Amino acid sequence: MIGKKIGEGRTAEVYDWSEDTVIKLFNDFVSAEEADREYQMQKLLCEHLPFCAGIYGREMVEGRSGLIYEKVQGSSMTKLLSSSPEKSRDMGKLMAEIHHKIHAVGLKSLPSIKEGTKHALSHAEKLSDDMKRKLLEILSELPEKESLCHMDFHPDNIFLDEERIVVLDWMTAGSGDPLADVARTEMILKFAVFPDVVVEIKDALQLLRGELLSGYHAVYFTGGITPEEERNLYLWETVLLGARLREGISDEECGILLDEIHHRLEDI
């Protein structure tokens, strides 16, 4: 029996299910096939990574697909940052350490990040045909690799307690160039819009995520970033800005991303 709601995101709501488990109930626009893909992916990932929440089964509740997950203890990195903003840079460093360990895993059986990005760009209605063409040309030149990539790696998907780190929401995971995953994380930290917050708080959050990004980048590229890595990181971020326009983000964020894409395409 479903208990109280304990969280929600764009694709699903999370409820208590038992003392040690929760149920992730997908919204109506998420197909049963997509839910099953997440189930199979989570099972596979748990065989290779210590950071995954256990997954125990599937349920249908009032016509909605649901997955039974381990109830994760601790707090999200976002929550910890809100109470201890002075730890932002250190949290960014920890993010980079976790991300390196994820990228050390090779799972070529997962969906291709490059192909997924191509599909997203092709179906991003807010992009003009000319912008799509240019972004797809850039994407075609980027490398196709076989590292495990999360592709939604940000503080709200990282949970910490005294004993364990758990990374959530692997629905977008795939196989590809680690720099694509790094670019996606840095893009979110730079450009994601904080909705419904007053100006003073928004300014504080901007400063916080600047520190977070600085710590993350410094540790991920310990020893420095090569010119080729720097170039590919920039190009991956550019195409992923376009792909993000298909994600149902706010009009404010859409405007910011479109302006950034226009600016970059003029320089590339």
Image (tube, rainbow, N blue to C red):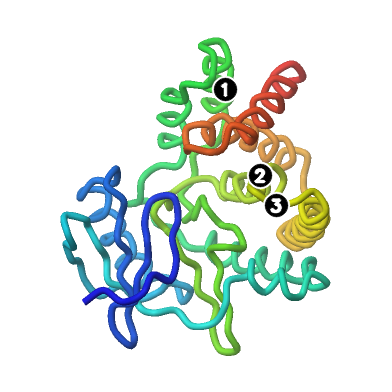
Is 66 situated above or below 202?
Answer: below
| Residue visible at 83% across and 53% down in the picture | 200
Give the residue type at disc 3. Answer: Val
Q: What element carries label 3?
A: loop
> Residue drawn 32% across and 88% down?
19
Residue underneath mark 2? 193
Left/right placement of residue 83 relative to residue 252 reads: right
Q: In this view, does 209 lie to the left or right of 97?
A: right
The amino acid marked with disc number 1 is: Leu
* Badge 2 element: loop
- Give me the C-alpha separation between circle 1 and circle 2: 23 Å
Residue 28 placement (x, y as % from top left): 27, 47
Q: Which amino acid does label 2 sit on?
A: Val
Q: Distance of mark 3 from mark 1, alpha carbons?
A: 33 Å
- CA gap, disc 3 and disc 2: 10 Å
Residue neighbourhood size for the residue with mark 3, other residues' Cα within 10 Å, grouped as few (<14), some (14–19), many (≥20): few
Query: Which picture quadrant has residue 118?
Result: top left
Ranked by sequence position, the earlier of labels 3 and 1 is 1
- Disc 1 target residue: 135
In the rendered structure, the answer to whether residue 66 lies left or right of residue 147 reads left
Q: Residues within 10 Å of mark 1 (few under 14, many from 20)?
A: many
Query: How many numbered tags mark residues here?
Result: 3
Residue 217 location in percent, x, y? 75, 55
- Are discs 3 and 1 less than 8 Å apart at CB? no
Name the mark on residue 197. Answer: 3
